[in-house]
Amino acid sequence: MLKALLLPRTWSIPQHALEVGQRGLLVAALALVVGTVPDGWRIALDAMSEAYLAVAVFVAGTLMLVLAVERALDTDLGTWLDLNRRWQVPAATLLGAFPGCGGAIIAVTQYTRGYLSFGAVVATLTATMGDAMFLLLARDPATALLVLAISLPVATLSGYAVDRIHGAGFLRPERTRTVPKRQRAGQECPADEDGAKEYIWLALMAPGLVIGVLAAFQIDIDAPIAALTGIAPAQGLGVAGAALGLYMWIRSDRGQSGLTGEQEPVCEASGTLLKSVIANTNFVMTWVIFAFIGYELFIQASGIDLGRLFAGWAPAVPAIAILVGFVPGCGPQIMVTTLYLSGAVPFSAQIGNAIANDGDALFPALAVAPRAALVATLYSAVPAGIVAYGWCALFEQAG
């Protein structure tokens, strides 16, 4: 007993608690920076409202539609891909081109199970723009369509070329095939311990989507109301939705995402679809908030005109954007898109980054097939460089 009291105890922190603490510190650090910049809080609140009403509401609407269709069809994607091998590369390209990283993550998972070729993985990673596509669609849909019009054929041709060179099974790990498991009839679903936040989240999202659509058509509902009452309800709702999303992101579990392609048991009555939509929307919105606030605070504090700064390095800007695309995750890619939308970098940099970046899909790929993931990422840089500098030579330098 005395020995037990004298010897030091080994304390262990649960993994979830550690992740929550790290996210909380990240948000706290951002708040500290905001407080040190003149007019920082006004800038931050404006950025939060814009991130919610211009991006998050459209992310949520898209994910709700896609996940509902997936559940309604209840199809086995792997079987279809196995039976239609000639269409694997185009199908993988479409999965990658879908906004967000969900389609690309699903494609990588199907490759590790033996249902997709290595060239199809290259096509997916070449086509995907990750969560940055949501931002581009919300802020500049014409450019988003142009990016898709370029990246889709480039990704498809790249995928077929790689399969011709290496074969379908190149670098594939040991082949295993699994199918999704569903909750057996009569088996109880786990109880939802805390659904109050989800209901509040939905209550804010519904009017937020309406306001976001109106704003997309340049209809400002705040202007007439603020002129009469001095209150801007749309901005207030945007800030409230963004704050709630940030809080839920800090407290979230990594396993809540429904787009990972992991073969977890699906419980129809447990709100799995709703939790997936909320987790993915909050994740995207958080990175958008950091990107918006970071850019605006940097400009406010430094007074630097990034457009002029990058103009002096014009030949290197597309290459830098392509190198940023190698970084796993969607945050750096959202920053590149933010710089493009602000006019700080040209379209050649945007298209180069869009083709080179793999978003969050690279994380599961590195975990289950690291060699394949690294080689596929390097392959995606080849068309990225050709297209980026080709566009620069034809349209930017000529102009």
Image: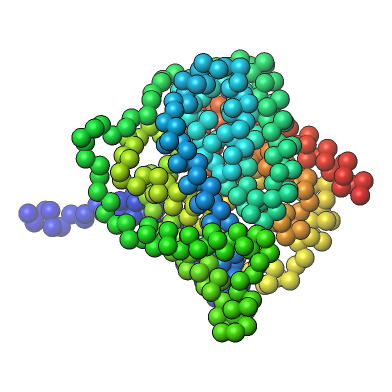
Q: Residue at x 55, y 35 (%)?
A: 104
Task: Tell me which corner region of the image, top left, top right, bottom left or bottom right, holds residue 7.
Answer: bottom left
- Could you tell me residue 202's position as x and y percent? 42, 58
Q: Residue at x 46, y 63 (%)?
A: 204
- Could you tell me residue 396's position as x and y percent? 87, 47
- Could you tell me residue 17's position as x and y percent? 33, 55
Between 337 and 10, the one nearer to me in the picture: 337
- Could you tell me residue 124's position as x and y percent? 60, 32
In this rendering, the answer to whether 226 lies above or below 268 is below
Name of the residue lying farthest toward the right: 398
Between 388 and 369, the one nearer to me in the picture: 388
Q: Residue at x 68, y 30 (%)?
A: 155
How many numbered marks are there? 0
Task: Tell me which corner region of the image, top left, top right, bottom left or bottom right, holds residue 152.
Answer: top right
Colouring used for the render? rainbow
Between 7 and 272, the one nearer to me in the picture: 272
In this rendering, the answer to whether 126 lies above or below 23 is above
Name of the residue lying farthest toward the left: 1
Q: Quadrant of the N terminus?
A: bottom left
**364 to the left or right of 228:** left
In this rendering, the answer to whether 101 lies above or below 314 is above
Query: Does residue 287 appear anywhere in the picture?
Result: no
Q: Residue at x 61, y 33 (%)?
A: 94
Task: Tell me which corner region of the image, top left, top right, bottom left or bottom right, holds residue 22.
Answer: bottom left
Query: Does residue 49 appear anywhere in the picture?
Result: yes
